[in-house]
Image (spheres, grey):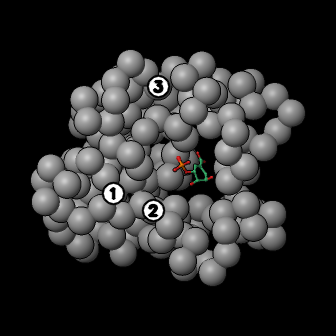
Amino acid sequence: MKVFLIGFMGSGKTSTGKELAKLLGYRFVDMDDLIVQRAGMSIPEIFSRFGEERFREIETEVLRDLVNEDDLVVSCGGGVVVKERNHFLLKQGGKVVFLMASPEVIYERVKDDTNRPLLNVPDPMDRIRDLLNQRMEKYLKVSDLRIDTDRRSPSE
Ligand code: S3P
């Protein structure tokens, strides 16, 4: 079995994924870490040198490799649902859990982080709302289960 955690940046995919993997006795992997390994550079560097499209290609390559593995909890990048080609890989690969959070809570969780190029803009709150609007339908469509994380700790 595999569990894919999807949701916006700052929705708690990594911290929740680690706890869940422990509970299930599964291995935990973070797609962003695998992308960094594969590219040999940080995420901001991939974006600035090669652009978002190239980042999305590497993201799909990493996801494709994971589909063949078992007993795994995967924390997906927040934008994994952007490309339709990833939807099939997620659905076919395991259970997809959408961790939801409000724009205000997301902002609080990510505001001091410089490792997320999409939020490195003059008005991050506006960008969060905009991207959430663009993505919500996709997160809902792809997921088997939805959990509101605004007032929940990872273990809850
Ligand atoms: C992205 C989310 C990030 C990372 C990249 C792009 C996005 O992952 O993949 O910066 O498009 O939402 P996290 O959700 O783990 O921060």
Q: Earlier in the sequence, mark 1 or mark 3?
A: 1
Q: Within the image, what quadrant is residue 108 found in?
A: top right
Q: Earlier in the sequence, mark 2 or mark 1?
A: 2
Q: Is mark 2 within 8 Å of ligand 1?
A: yes
Residue named by callout 3:
101
Q: Earlier in the sequence, mark 2 or mark 3?
A: 2
Residue named by callout 2:
31
Q: Secondary structure at mark 3?
A: loop
Q: Nearer the viewer, residue 17 or 65?
A: 17
Q: Within the image, what quadrant is residue 2 found in?
A: bottom left
Where residue 50 appears, x then y in whole percent?
77, 70
Which residue is pictured at 46% across the width and 25% down the height? 101
Position of residue 76 relative to residue 131, above or below, is: below
Disc 2 and disc 3: Cα gap in Å? Answer: 20 Å
Kind of residue at badge 3:
Ala
Disc 2 and disc 1: Cα gap in Å? Answer: 7 Å
Q: Is mark 3 within 8 Å of ligand 1?
A: no
Residue named by callout 1:
74
Kind of residue at badge 2:
Met
Residue 126 shown left or right of residue 24 in the figure: right
Which residue is pictured at 73% across the width and 60% down the height? 44
Position of residue 21 relative to residue 121, above or below, is: below
Q: Are marks 2 and 1 in contact (CB under 8 Å)?
A: yes
- Residue 64 shows up from this direction: yes
